[in-house]
Amino acid sequence: MGDSEQRHRLVVYGAGAVGKTCIIQRFLKKTFTDHYKQTVEDLHCRDYNINGVSLKVDILDTAGTMSFPAMRRLSIATGHGFLIIFSIDSSGSFEEAKQIWEQIKELRSNYQDLPCVIVGNKCDLETKREVQYEDAQDWARSEGMESAYMETSAKLDRGISDIFQKLLEQAKIPEIRKLEPILKRRLSANSANLS
């Protein structure tokens, strides 16, 4: 890899069926499916050229089970940023999100410097809510991430771009921060489409 090329890895964690793949697909391809297919591990690569700097962004969609603990440790060790997703209609998935965060803290001494967003997905299922917004916000605040918690719905395309905007705000990598105008244009286009 040359001096003008950089690779950054965003790792997406969460229990099975919380919507990790749906969030990624909604963001990258503007698509959604209700069909659930268990993910073992998928890597989505995107290339950007910003002022002559080649920036490669890898989004790693991880398995929703602990069947592969060595893979999880490796992805934590090699990640530059993290998305930890749970479903608001599953208190068990919220507990798993907390466990994932504890693993990141154990394996990465610089965890406080890494971009990380906690996502309560499926806010379209409000009537089935098991995890209260305030409880998730309080937990994030207790972990020093009060501004990094948000709720989304991949199904309704609600808050999806905001996740990635939040990650950009946390990133201390100049090349990634230069992507912010691109994302803002995308956010504006999404708002116009919703009107």
Image (spheres, rainbow, N blue to C red):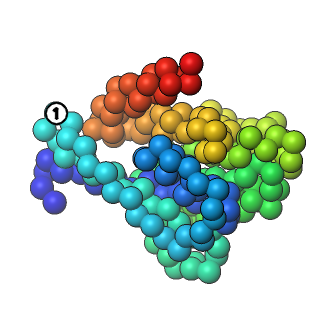
Name the residue nearer the viewer: 60 or 123. Answer: 123
Residue at 56% from the left image edge and 50% from the top image edge: 32
Determine which residue is flagged by label 1: 51
Q: Quadrant of the C terminus?
A: top right
Question: In the rendered view, does 101 fall on the left or right side of 177?
Answer: right
Q: Residue at x 30, y 31 (%)?
A: 178
Label 1 crowd (10 A; few <14 / some 14-19 / many >=20): few
Residue plotted at (64% across, 56% down)? 34
| Mark 1: secondary structure | loop
- The residue sitting at 59% across, 54% down in the picture is 33
* Residue 3 spot, x, y in % from top left: 13, 51
- Let me know if residue 13 appears in the view: yes
Between 172 and 186, the residue placed more toward the observer is 186
Quadrant placement of the N terminus:
bottom left
Amino acid at the residue labelled 1: Asn
Q: Position of residue 174 (x, y in %)?
A: 30, 35
70 to 31, vertically: above or below: below
Image side of residue 68 versus residue 110, left or right: right
Q: Nearer the viewer, residue 100 or 127?
A: 127
Q: Could you tell me if residue 112 is visible in this image?
A: no
- Which of 173 and 184 lies nearest the eye of the viewer? 184
Residue 64 lies, with reference to residue 122, above or below; the image says: below
* Image position, residue 173 (x, y; %): 33, 40
Q: Is 99 positioned to the left or the right of 178 in the image?
A: right
